[in-house]
Image (cartoon, coloured by chain):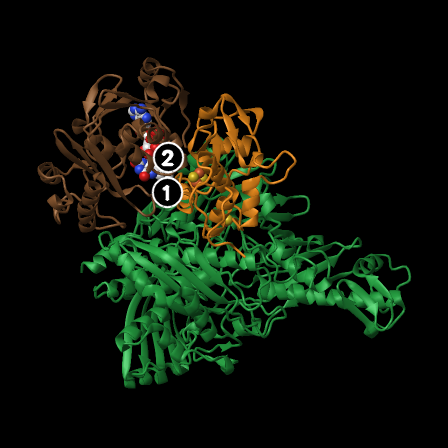
Amino acid sequence: MYNFEFAKPKTVEEAASAMAAEGAQALGGGQTLLPTMKQRLASPEVLVSMTGIESMVGVAVRGDTLTIGGATTHAQVAADAADLYPGLAALAANIGDPAVRNRGTIGGSLANNDPAACYPAGALGSGATITTNTRDIAADDYFQGMFETALDEDEIITSVSFPIPEKANYQKFDQPASRFALVGVFVAKTADGVRVAVTGASNEGVYRWTEAETALSASFSEGALESMSGNLDDMIADLHGSASYRAHLVGVLTRRAVAACG
Amino acid sequence: MPTITMNVNGTAVSANVENRTVLSAALREELGLTGTHIGCDTSQCGACVVHVNGKAVKACTMFAVEANGADVDTIEGQAHVDGSLNVIQQAFQDHHGLQCGFCTPGMIMSAAALLKENPKPTEAEVRDYLEGNICRCTGYQGIVNAIMAASGQTPAIAAE
Amino acid sequence: MAADGGMGHATKRREDVRFLTGRGKYTDDYTPAKTTYCAFARSTVANGKINSIDTKDAAGMPGVVTVFTGEDFAEVGGNPAGWLINSRDGEPMKEPKRPVLAHGKVRHVGDAYAAVIAETLEQAMDAVEAIDADIDELDAVVNMVDALANSTTLVHDEIGTNQCFDWGWIEDNRAATDEAIKNAPHVTTLELVNNRLVPNAMEPRCSIGEYDPGTGDYKLTTTSQNPHLTRLLISAFVMGIPENKLTVHAPDVGGGFGSKIYHYGEEALVLAAAKKLNRPVKWTSTRTEAFLSDAHGRDHVTKIELACERDGTFIAFRTETMANVGAYLSNFSTATPTFLHGTLMAGNYTVPNVYVNVKAVFTNTAPVDAYRGAGRPEATFSLERVIDKAARELGMDPIALRRKNFIKPDQYPYASAAGLEYDSGNYDALMDGLEAAADLAGFEARRAESAKNGKLRGLGINSYIEACGIAPSNLVGVLGSRVGLYDAATVRVNATGNISVMVGAHSHGQGHETAFPQVVADMLGVDPMSIEIVHGDTSKIPFGMGTYGSRSLAVCGSAVFRATEKIIKKATLIAAHMMEDKPENVDFEDGDFSVKGTNKKVSFGDVALKAYIPHDFPLEDIEPGLEETAFYDPANFTYPSGAYACEVEVDPDTGKVDICSMIAMDDFGNVVNPMIVTGQVQGGLAQGIGQALLEHGIYDENGQLLSGSLMDYAMPRADDLPNFVVDHSHATRCTHNPIGVKGCGEAGAIGSPPTVVNAVVDALQRGGHDVEHIDMPVSPARVWEAMNG
Ligand SMILES: Cc1cc2nc3c(=O)[nH]c(=O)nc-3n(C[C@H](O)[C@H](O)[C@H](O)COP(=O)(O)OP(=O)(O)OC[C@H]3O[C@@H](n4cnc5c(N)ncnc54)[C@H](O)[C@@H]3O)c2cc1C
Ligand code: FES
Ligand code: FES
């Protein structure tokens, strides 16, 4: 890997100024960035570590909103949100393996927006708000296709706020090698209706399955979906599954998520 | 080159590393602790698992500078001071939890982390916890048996 | 028997202690003073013409010491194939040169065409990026059918074809087999793929070259299952370094599974570089490089026919296979699809006609060679899948059909229709044991329970035979081997009574350091802990052909046995001299020599000491010292066999297969350390289940390896696997080696793939889906697609 300058700021302000440098990039847990740098596919000139910024670490609840600091690890979310937002905590508890969860952060996951990652489904499915050092971005505006987000180059995810739904569940069908989601579906039932977010399936990255949302908002039951399956058009086809298989799984997993919501 | 200090297996050490030096390289090359192994370059295999401030991490997927000031525990520090095997290590020997030994340091460190979090795991919990530790030799059964035994439980199907 | 820890004891492994405390020493853990680091420039295209390689910029980069290209090795030899196969028409196989670095052409993604040596690894990698290689990408041949049909796109232009050989076994049986199939009342046909696998030993390859200009000695420290073969190939073929000037040391090795049997170009390169620079040169493979450059396994496309009577009596097996050898011939690549596969195509059965045709095909992919099981998994998979299909077509129970055709215990030695002579076995006893352990009577209830949970349950059965203890030189010589396949051991009894045993086998997980002493301790009546095994270093051991083909104990262990017999013979002479009696009057038991009918007695330890203090020896009759060497070359292969059962649950919604149970009943002959044997089987089962459900080395049509990392190549993890039931109590002794052992290292990987696939097909059939076959890996997507047309 190429060498780089390293900064470990203690505050968001310090981090923001470090990020202003040419070629600067945020470093969360490094669970994505480090392997990418080893492959020499990324070559940041300055890495700005987020993990020393105390205000960006932790899980807090205010009213019916759960706020997670941008540098909070998956392990901490799994533990600290277990009672507050069990559907999201369970998602975090099933990302990667224990060692990955001890380092990987929600900010890193959402900034990276891997098309097979779990948090994007959780954030979009919950209708979360992504807060950066400069602004708030609604999840609906944030995800812009595979590895693409609304973030500016030097923007830092400082926290993510999740309205806590009545019920929620995430179903992940593992890609057998990477154990990322071959398809993952997050279903959240709120007073305003049902949101269904799908990851792993589409060439456009995480997306809302609006047909299912409509059907489930009318009647929150497996039956409401009958034998519906995802829209074939943009489905990923690769060595782990064809487009039609993924479309099928979208239906299966959505039904399972609804069933698991009880 | 930055100098970092760490408390490795209970001893304060310092090392000169580049910013790009990963923790596993610092341990292996700067400190001569070659028990931490490198089995992949995509952060999947777990041969490199060590504990940083008590938590299992993949030493190949953390910059050494990020471990500045941290407590780091590696396989070399696991045996008792008199050199005898600790309860997990002993269980691995008793239950044939290793063959070539390459994955073993990572397995032991993951097992130690598991038993700290969950002193009496079920077999399914053990298997699930090892998701990030690949062993090509054993078929995992000896490993699972060893961890069950180390937690004071009887393995489902014992080796001979 | 030794008081404790002798033959048959589940002795805990002594090597474990160093591995458990982080004190194992693998190749990459060695860094000699002044080491330089090597990185390779590897082709990113599957087939390309090298116009030029400009290394000027790279050579000027910081820390760079030197740069090599294929040009530098144009004059040295190639890495040869170890077995010469002749085609059906008598023509010898096509054997294109495999250079140290690609020269003129690159032939697969990952083919190394240049190497940089620098002060640090990062500097070497930086400089690799600065190499300016002008390579014209050419069309690639990836698919074997295309490769054979296509005479214009060639992997090796100079041989004019992509076919390496077209082999018939046994050619004289061809007409009779064709005739038998034509006239048979029933013929079952199956086309199947034996999926390409990437071995993925957890320790990536690593090699360190050193050169001493004072003595002219070279040293290669390397990840090898087979240090003597590596030395031989480097000396005799590739570099011409005299064998007595080259030490090859394979220290602790983190698994091999076949991939580290072979000599690779990187080993020659670090030696050449060390000499040129007069400094140590180290190369450590990344996992990414391993995917691209380690020898892969399997990759057969097969059509098999089983002809039988209506009552299920087998009449003939006929197999047509295309075997991918990749871009170059790796050392054992030509033996694997032929003699390790074709000769097993009679299975455990009294079938009179067997004919096998194998076409080996060059493609623009990584070389393919022996991987755990090597040829026998391919043979077993074809046989046991077509037998299962035949059972369904004939309306017979799959166990009954197999039993009907089993060779019976009173038929040994049995000359199989595929040309081997099986020495011992009892397949019905294994099947009896399996039926009892598998609780077949309870299957329906378990199936109903699964159905309640919406799952389809299936049961798969399999029986296998394999040829192990890869050796007999006379036999392998007839079959085309260019080397002998014996093994060697030296037993050195030191003056103080402790013992060093230098063995040609290499332990990289198999526990030789524990098991071999059990054999010697048993024979000498001494404490096993007083015996130390020395292996892996050509400067310390007499000779050896390494560890693979489940041969270590059967072949090398037998050499140890023979050398120990010689020790006893000589010690008896010394003891007789000490007790002033004739050797024929001296008995040796439990570590003591005594004179028959007297109370005269000396211990083994006393004799050892005496051997080195020969003050009063009759030197014409007894030489001083107590050290003996034996080379052992067996009379035949050994023939382990087994019966396996597996139950699976298929989730019809997703196609996901869960293994509920896996039972392995194996006959390994005598067992020296049952704990180690069980572990070997468990590991093999995991690899076999990996092949059946998860693993696939898959290239796209341009020759890019799609599953080129652990992110896409699915390795079995702990939660993919069940607890295994492993039983090796139904044993029949090997009749021709002194320990009576057969070999256990590969069984699990041979027996399990067809067992799993049979179970999945059974589950689907019972669930009302008309699915006859699914190719491995039986992934969720493939199962779902099979179920949904
Ligand atoms: C073996 C393995 C298995 C995994 N399995 C899963 C899985 O099942 N599901 C899943 O969802 N993920 C999985 N991951 C990915 C894991 O969750 C990562 O932790 C995550 O994708 C990235 O988080 P990170 O904190 O490590 O970010 P880093 O790797 O540090 O950074 C990733 C990207 O985010 C940027 N970034 C980091 N933090 C911030 C911030 N606060 N603000 C702005 N930009 C930032 C970085 O600049 C970089 O571009 C796996 C990873 C591994 C190694
Ligand atoms: S070496 Fe760290 S995960 Fe493989
Ligand atoms: S013991 Fe060899 S990889 Fe686990």
Q: Residue at x 80, y 67 (%)?
A: C572
Residue highlighted by disc 1: C133
Residue highlighted by disc 2: A40
Res A18 visible = yes
Residue A136 at x, y percent in the picture? 21, 20
The subunit letter for the residue under badge 2 reads A
Q: Colour of chain A?
A: brown
Residue C254 at x, y percent in the picture? 52, 48
Work out which quarter of the rendered image holds the C terminus of chain C and state it.
bottom left
Residue A127 at x, y percent in the picture? 18, 28
**Figure quarter occupied by ligand 1:** top left
User: Residue flagged by tag 1: what amino acid is it?
Assistant: Ala
The subunit letter for the residue under badge 1 reads C
Q: Nearer the viewer, mark 1 or mark 2?
A: 2
User: Residue flagged by tag 2: what amino acid is it?
Assistant: Arg
Q: Is residue C464 above or below residue A25?
A: below
Q: Secondary structure at mark 1?
A: strand
Q: Colour of chain B?
A: orange
Q: Which chain is green?
A: C
Q: Quadrant of residue C562?
A: bottom right
Q: Is residue A67 left or right of residue C260?
A: left
**B5 vs C755, nearest the viewer:** C755
Q: Is residue C706 above or below residue C130?
A: below
**Are the numbered discs 1 and 2 placed on the same chain, yes or no?**
no
Q: Is residue A116 above or below residue C738?
A: above
Mark 1 surroundings: few (<14), some (14-19) or many (≥20) residues within 10 A: some
